[in-house]
Amino acid sequence: MRILFFVSILSLYSLLHLYVLIKMRSAFAFSAVTAIFLIVFMVLMVSAPVVVRVLEGHRFDVTARLISYLGYIWMGLVFLFFFCSLAIDIYRLLVYATGRMLHTGFPFLIPSPRIAFFIALLPTLAIAVFGYYEARTIRTETVVIQSPKIPEGIGALTIAQISDVHLGLIVRHKRLKRILNAVRRANPDILVSTGDLVDGQIDNLTGLAELLQTVNPPYGKYAITGNHEFYAGLNQALNFAQSAGFTVLRGETSDASGIITVVGIDDPTGKYFGLYRGVSEKTLLSHHSNKKFVLLLKHIPVVNKEALGLFDLQLSGHTHKGQIFPFNLITRLFFPYHTGLISLPHGSQLYVSRGSGTWGPPIRFLSPPEVTIIKLVHAKISTSLLNPHELFKINQDIFVTELNYGGDPV
């Protein structure tokens, strides 16, 4: 199954390169020697992720990081150019079809192959530059949830969520410091990592666990596995998370200072590796009293219908909101619960993070990275007190909702 998936992705990526090569050939009359050079370069770029893994396995970290940046930035450029050029192709087809129906032509409306190439190239480069910097601009999203299960006397219980950080060759110390600075500003009671803390290449994470150790919320730090924990090597990923100070929940629960119950689910990718741990969600969640707030950590934003009403809030990630537009249109097809706060039946809620880091290309477009701050407050606390400028000191939108116990969410 994994081999089939890998071959399918590699084949699709190769076809994208073929499309780009055809566009280049139609725009420029280059020689056979130039064509061979381009083909060799593209073959190297397609195989770059594999080459990086081999180099890192042999401890050529500097070379691996250099090729990783080159290969993944190129990947982002190829994706962006494909979509920009495809839009121009669709436009040209519509103009041609209109001309055929009207028995006339509109040659002045159809750009030449060379002009079309540059029309696609310019926004590709502009978006890539913008997206490179957007990927490094961590936003804070604040969510306020009212629930009668939160003790009125504690005020607000603050949970900071990071997700899909993908620590590895590209996401390193500077990016992690920005993420942790956003966490520190919120002064959370609990920190959770909802999967993919590490990337597929994690042979050298020196100093990163130590950075994570500097954040120590009073009610604990909890993490779960994502698909990349299994790709990277589960034991190594777990050792890293634990050395960073996280309690890793794999089909397990933990009582956070007697205030809320934290439940962690293993990512289903573990089943393909024979490493999945835990019982069904319904069985795991049924063990808890409905008097205490239940926080469910689950990497993929899929809701188990049998578990509805057995948890109060599910925190997920995985989708990256597509990371680079228009990939969000594709990821939304697979994950209807795509991003943000969603009200579910039977009083449950789901929040899907856009992710704090990047996978593959170090680029984000129309999907900025986030650190999510969840404020849990008692249902009787007036929402007028939850002014983001006065109470939270965070200049972000506030989503205010009330857990649905027979009524409608606010």
Image (cartoon, rainbow, N blue to C red):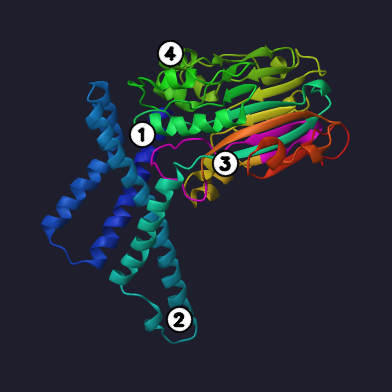
Which is more N-terminal, label 1 or label 4? 1
Does the magenta portion include 160? no
Q: CA distance from mark 4 to mark 1?
A: 21 Å
The kind of residue on which mark 1 rests is Ile
* Residue, disc 4: 235
Which labelled disc corresponds to residue 170?
A: 1
Q: What residue is rendered at 29% in x and 28% in y? A: 53
Earlier-in-chain disc, 2 versus 1: 2
Q: Amino acid at mark 3?
A: Phe
Q: Report, in whole angstroms, how far the alpha carbon at label 4 lies from the one at label 3.
A: 29 Å
Mark toward the viewer: 4 or 2:
4
**Three-letter residue code for mark 4:** Asn
Q: What is the quadrant of the C terminus in the image?
A: top right
Give the mark nearer the N terminus: 4 vs 2: 2
Q: Are marks 4 and 2 in contact (CB under 8 Å)?
A: no
- Left or right relative to 238: residue 21: left
Mark 2–mark 1 CB contact (< 8 Å): no
Q: Which residue is mark 3?
A: 334
* Highlighted range, magenta: 341-367
